Amino acid sequence: MHFPIRKITIIVASILIIAYFFSNFWLYKKHSSLTFPLVKDDPYYFFGDKLVSLQLTHEKIELTGSYGNTSACILPSDSEKNIWIIHLHGTNNLYDSETNLWRYKVWNNLGINIITLNYITQEGSKQIASSEKMYQSALMAYNYLVTKGSVPYDHILVYGEGLGTYPASKLAKEMQIAGLILENGITSMQKFLKDLYPILAVGYLVEEQFHVEQYVKEIEVPSLFIYLEKDDTYPTQHTKQLFEKAGSREKKLISLKDKSKALKNKNIKTYQKALSDFLKELKLRVI
């Protein structure tokens, strides 16, 4: 049977065009939920029980501000040094998610006090409101330490991971802190999605936000950049690019060979040493 090549070409081309159109439409409708997914709550008693098993104490607090209110948690260390980390996690978990617990233990072992928080959500929803409200949530934590906790700004470290690198880098640029730590970040949301979906018209479909590289260029405080070589969420080249563009004269890039979930079992000593060395360079040695 003879099939006209021209007809077959037209059919295949039409299918590809339709598929391309619907792929772009899907991205346009879904990019918001990809950026701010609905996160399932773990029962708070589960979080408390886990902290007890790790010999960590905690206090739940509320952060309030003109942009909204949110919950937070303080995990004090036994050290007499008044060193603090503001922990800004990604948008795919909450501060009491089990994936964060090993970090809290490492930081506590280093004698660091921790304030970790959830981001302001949309009214009547558990979905994060916006990138700006992520920053405002971080700012409330900073103000809480400085005003209520009387913590000197040069005793505050800001730690951002994933999309939490956006409020972390902006806070480091806008406020006075001792140092910045970014783990597996992105340069911007558009560039991240372009890497994820290179053939789609991302620039026309997705509003530019999470412009982390814009802030790291202007940051002057000592900065540590960490990327996990086997991470399958954010491309490792983004963290490398942030390191290259960072304005700080005191900056360091380290790589760890596992995913975040495996890191707590295999490379936790490497991770802890990297943070300890960073504290030494800041003259914030606490152990």
Image (tube, rainbow, N blue to C red):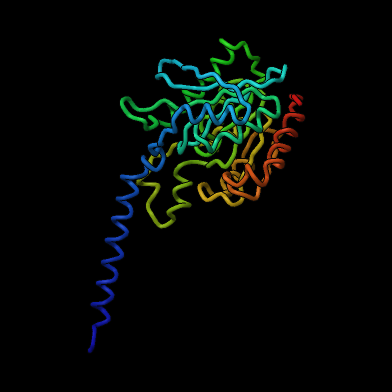
270 sits to left or right of 61 = right
- Residue drawn at 68 percent across, 45 percent down: 267
**Residue 174 picture location, percent across and down:** 56, 23
Q: Is residue 84 above or below residue 234?
A: above
Q: Who's the residue at 44% across and 37% down the image? A: 209
Say how many tags the image has: 0
User: Please, is residue 47 above or below residue 207 in the view?
Assistant: above
Q: Quadrant of the N terminus?
A: bottom left
**Image x and y of residue 135, in percent:** 48, 26
Query: Looking at the picture, how far across and down is residue 8, in whole percent?
Result: 26, 77
Q: Viewer-proximal residue, 201 or 40? A: 40
Residue at the extreme bottom: 1
* Residue drawn at 75 percent across, 34 percent down: 277
Q: Is residue 15 above or below residue 110?
A: below
Relative to residue 62, is residue 232 depicted above or below? below
Frontmost residue, 59 versus 85: 59
Question: The C terminus appears in which quarter of the rendering?
Answer: top right
Res 239 quadrant in image: top right
Residue 4 lies left or right of residue 58; in this view the side is left
- Between residue 65 and residue 237, name the one nearer to us: 65
Q: Quadrant of residue 59?
A: top right
In the image, residue 231 lies at what x, y percent?
56, 49
